[in-house]
Amino acid sequence: RPADSRPADTRPAATSDVALFEAQQVQVQPTPATEERRIPSFGAVEVNRANRQYVGEPVSFTLNNADLVETLRTFSRLSDLNFVIQPGVRGSVTVELNSVPWDQALEQILRINNLGTEIDGSIVRIAPLGQLRAEAEERRQLEAARAQAIPLTTIMRPLSYANANDISGLLRSRSGAILSARGTVQVDRRTNTLIIRELPGYIDTVLAVIENLDTPEPQVSIEARIVEASKQFTRTLGIRWGFEQVANAANGNTTGLEFPNNIASDGGVSLLTGGANGFLNLSMGNILNTFTLDAALVAAESEGLINVVAAPRVTTLNNERASIQSGTQIPIQTISNQTVTVQFVNATLQLTVVPHVTAEGTIQLDIDVSKKAPVPAFAIAGSTNSPISTKEAQTKVIVRDGGTAVIGGIYEVSNNQSQDRVPGLANIPVLGHLFKNKTNRDTNEELMIFITPRIIQM
């Protein structure tokens, strides 16, 4: 053993304790050459002991004020590892352990002496934790300096579907940044191309992220049927919904959602209801059999129960707004400083839909429907312009691909009185009632909107 320049330790207890430790040690069987040797991670610079597993053989020993360096050398012989002890490591050890894995025992001794390890193959270097942390920081700074010296690689990535500005913002986001500190990205709006300058080691990751994001959005075809229906038709259609659908815990309902109980005792959907005097009371239903619905609409129109106002169709991308508008523009005269100005006001039925295709293949629809129409029965004093009646509703509904959602509740209630009379004879007192006829007609019509979205496969 090389000569030790330190002053001799005259404490007899320490020497006897180390000798006793060596006499009590449990011999570790040599690892066969064909097996991969497991090096314990004891006493690392940053220790995470939450899920630590110790692999050393159990040992039992008692040390009282034993020399730290000699104790570490004994662990080196016990573990069959090469320990390199940093100059300046000194101290004493006083422990009493019983059937403890030797790597756990060594870790505890290193902890109480503020020491750490740096493992390189079968060589274990033991040094103060502060020194090891400082060296790790130096290595990190050296790696950063080397990275700064590496020339950047420039790549141009045209995008087919995604917006280049959106992808650029994601790459440069500070939270979970994908680019390195030196990486930059620019956007060519004309060609929707990303111009990326990045370290070679980051290029593959950046391109993989762009590849996953630059995918086509599904297209959704939205067909709407706008119907003015009588109260008799809405009741009939409501009964048909009830007996064509089963909504319970086993089957769920047409939205794909499951409920713990039946919606109604007979499996039906509540009839559409609305407020009186034209006030809006929104109701929604969901029909899967679109062919049956079309047949019902054709039959009802031939019977005079409904009037199909419009059946527009529009196609839009997923998460993009689609708007359908039908109606006229009404000229409104305004007079200012003896100057007559004509302004046009929209009296239209407008339907705006934003589709969201879910991972399950259903379609969530954000629906905004409004109807603006003149009211000739009401007149404004001193003006020939009719007021505009406005009804508007906003809602969300989930429909399966090819299913039909129906929105009802926009009611129009009117009362018409007419009189037929024979001129002259109708004015005779008492007997005049025989020559005239009064008719009161109350109408209750509901504006219903059937929406059928379909996913267009690319």
Image (cartoon, rainbow, N blue to C red):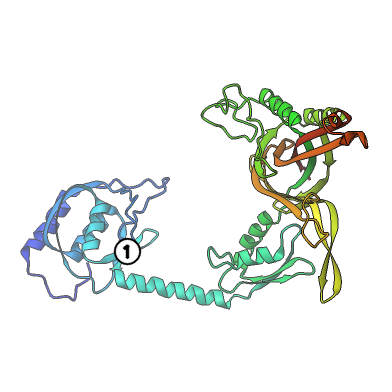
Q: Is residue 280 above or below residue 328?
A: above
- Residue 352 lies left or right of residue 49; in this view the side is right
Residue at 26% from the left image edge and 66% from the top image edge = 115
Circle 1 is placed at which residue position? 117
Furthest residue in direction right, as rendered? 423
Say which quadrant the N terminus sits in: bottom left
Say which quadrant the C terminus sits in: top right
Splitting the image into 4 quarters, where does residue 69 fall? bottom left
Residue 94: percent from left, percent from top:
13, 60
Q: Does the rendering let one see residue 58?
A: yes
Residue 267: percent from left, percent from top:
61, 24
Residue at 72% from the left image edge and 54% from the top image edge = 320
- Residue 285 lies left or right of residue 111; in this view the side is right
Residue 221: percent from left, percent from top:
78, 44
- Residue 391 lies left or right of residue 102; in this view the side is right
The amino acid type, in three-letter code, at marker 1 is Thr
Q: Secondary structure at mark 1?
A: strand
